[in-house]
Image (cartoon, grey):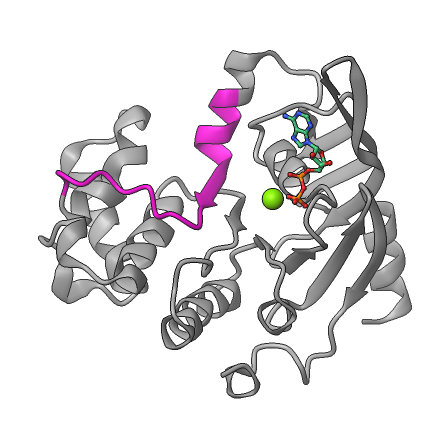
Amino acid sequence: MNVATSLARAAGAGAILRLGDLHKQFLLEGETVHALRGVSFAIQPGEFVAIMGPSGSGKSTLLNILGCLDRPTSGDYYLGGENVAALDDDTLSEIRCRRIGFVFQSYNLIPQLTVLENIEVPLFYQGISPLEARQRSRQLAEMVGLSDRLRHRPYQLSGGQQQRVAIARSLANNPLMILADEPTGNLDSATEGEILQVLIDLNRRGITIIMVTHEDRIAHIARRVIRLRDGGVVSDSPESEAVNSSLENLI
Ligand SMILES: Nc1ncnc2c1ncn2[C@@H]1O[C@H](COP(=O)(O)OP(=O)(O)O)[C@@H](O)[C@H]1O
Ligand SMILES: [Mg+2]
């Protein structure tokens, strides 16, 4: 990265999201827990970022705030140019549905629905015609390598295939970014490699991915690793292009 790009990045210019001195405190049985203590960073379109840190370091709290599932106690969170830190619940959930794709460790698919129907779920709330929704879900299924499983239901799929459906569903609304919380946590190592490859391919198509993981070998596929400890960022380093995206090193 050249100096101009680094400076622009530090200033948050052109960023998809920017956090400024973000704090989150929880009150637990009269005690204040400082889950995040002044987190600041910006993420540019097209980045693939891993968020790492030991248990209790604030990863989930941070991801919940990034995903508009929770609010910071103080600080700024600019998402697509808008400060969402202080928005009310309804506006926050609207932003969540329209602008953010989620991928969880557990796939959270609807068991009664087929692959195509599961991918279409987020589109139902958008007033898109059934025909258009079907076209879009076919394209997305194809993108994640599920063209031959369109009418299967979740129980007829492997874990890796179910996670592919979840990834396709996360893209249905053309989100600004995908937030993935330990997306391979339930998978064996071969399938883990497959799913990481899907994420790498999507990122190559320009999709911004922020992924929480506690495993170094998984974080290595990201181009940038943000490490948390005790609610603060202890390092934020772009990985070298050489390390990035080589799955052969991983498995
Ligand atoms: N809802 C909550 N109420 C009280 N404390 C919480 C809550 N959520 C998280 N914490 C505390 O905040 C800290 C960070 O938690 P978390 O974000 O879940 O960490 P990680 O995901 O890195 O394991 C921990 O000390 C945790 O106990
Ligand atoms: Mg967690």
99 is within the stretch colored magenta: yes
- Magenta segment: does it hold 166? no
Which residue is farthest front? 29
Q: Quadrant of the N terminus?
A: bottom right
Q: Residue furthest bottom?
A: 248
The residue lying at 34 percent from left, 49 percent from top is 166
Depth check: give the residue in front, 31 or 138: 31
Q: Is residue 7 above or below residue 97?
A: below
The residue sitting at 38% across, 77% down in the picture is 190
Who is closer to the viewer here, 169 or 10?
169
18 relative to 196 in the view: left or right: right
Residue 3 placement (x, y as % from top left): 90, 67
Instruction: Looking at the picture, tell me which residue is in the foreground, 123 or 229.
Output: 229
Q: Is residue 200 left or right of residue 146?
A: right
* 68 in relation to 46, above or below: above
Q: How far from the left and from the top, in percent, is residue 212?
A: 60, 53
Q: Is residue 49 visible?
A: yes
Q: Is residue 98 above or below residue 170?
A: above
| Relative depth, front residue between 119 and 196 | 196
Q: Residue at x 13, y 66 (%)?
A: 148
* Residue 74 appears in view: no
Q: In the image, what residue occupies the spot 26% across and 45% down?
A: 119
Give the quarter of the image for residue 29.
top right
Residues in magenta?
93-113
Q: Which quadrant holds residue 62?
A: top right
Q: How many marks?
A: 0
x, y (%) of residue 224? 71, 64
Left or right: residue 135 compared with residue 58: left
Image quarter for ligand 1: top right
> How far across and how far down the image is residue 127, in percent?
27, 25
